Amino acid sequence: MTTEKNALVTGANKGIGLETARRLAALGFKVWLGARDSRRGDAAAEAFRSEGFDVERLELDVTSDESVAAAVRTVAARTSSLDVLVNNAGVATGYVDALNPDGRYERPPSQEPLADTKAIYDVNVFGPIRVTQAFLPLLLAAPAARIVMLSSYLGSIARAVGSGAGESQSPNVMGYGSSKTALNAITVAFARELAPRGIMVNAAAPGYTATDLNGHKGHRTVQQAAEIVVRLATLDAGGPTGGYFDENGPLPW
């Protein structure tokens, strides 16, 4: 299969990232499957290629300047531009350990280890900044690039305080939730800078999806979760930028 457009999905060897890569490949993109785990990344890429998709595993650790720089060199050696960047890689260190048998989160902020919070921010906040900045020359070389940040309902301060119409308070997950709040702000910052250059930057909330992140206790499938991600990654000209969306529309910040 030959393609003209290139997409990079970070953390794409499993979960929502893997399904997003599949969907973009099915739309005709050459997909760079960003993965820190080379074994799982290679297996995923090979499986996609066996389906006729143009997918290549890209070694990428979003917490490492050196790894990200090497990934940029690899992609730049093969293409002159990048049309889509999906910052999907994310962690929720300590989250699963704090779930009770019914799947409810039961660790108050006063008991969340600072080391866990730092690990979460390193991937969920600094990772997207690092990757976006590094790949920006390739994104700017595309005629109309799209950047999607994988956020969460837990990133909404309105939901956290229960101020949304008809909404109850979201779970009080300090480290992970606040990392997604920060990611929402980062989304807006990049969107403001890049709008004049024709690049749209938006945050997607995929919902509580069954993945390794939550011990597969989520009630949504990765197919449902990827819907809004792919939609924002393939926006037509004139679409929104600097927004925060789920599949039903804009979300309260």
Image (cartoon, rainbow, N blue to C red):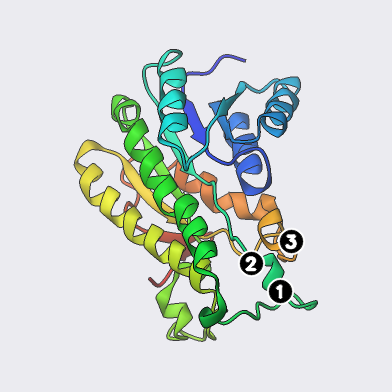
Q: Of callouts 3 and 1, which one flags the residue occurring earlier in the amino acid sequence?
A: 1
Mark identifier at residue 95: 2
Rendered residue at 66%/29% (across/down) = 38
Element class at badge 1? loop
Report whether 101 appears left or right of 53. right
Q: Distance between the residues labelled 3 and 1?
A: 9 Å
Crowd class of label 1 (few under 14; some 14 to 19; many from 20; radius 10 Å): some
Which residue matches tag 3?
215
Crowd class of label 2 (few under 14; some 14 to 19; many from 20; radius 10 Å): some
Quadrant hosting residue 13:
top right
Which residue matches tag 1?
99
Q: Label 1 is placed on what type of residue?
A: Leu
Tell which of 92 and 231 is nearer to you.
92
Q: In which quarter of the image is the N terminus?
A: top right
Element class at badge 2? loop
Numbered circles on residues, count: 3
Element class at badge 3? loop
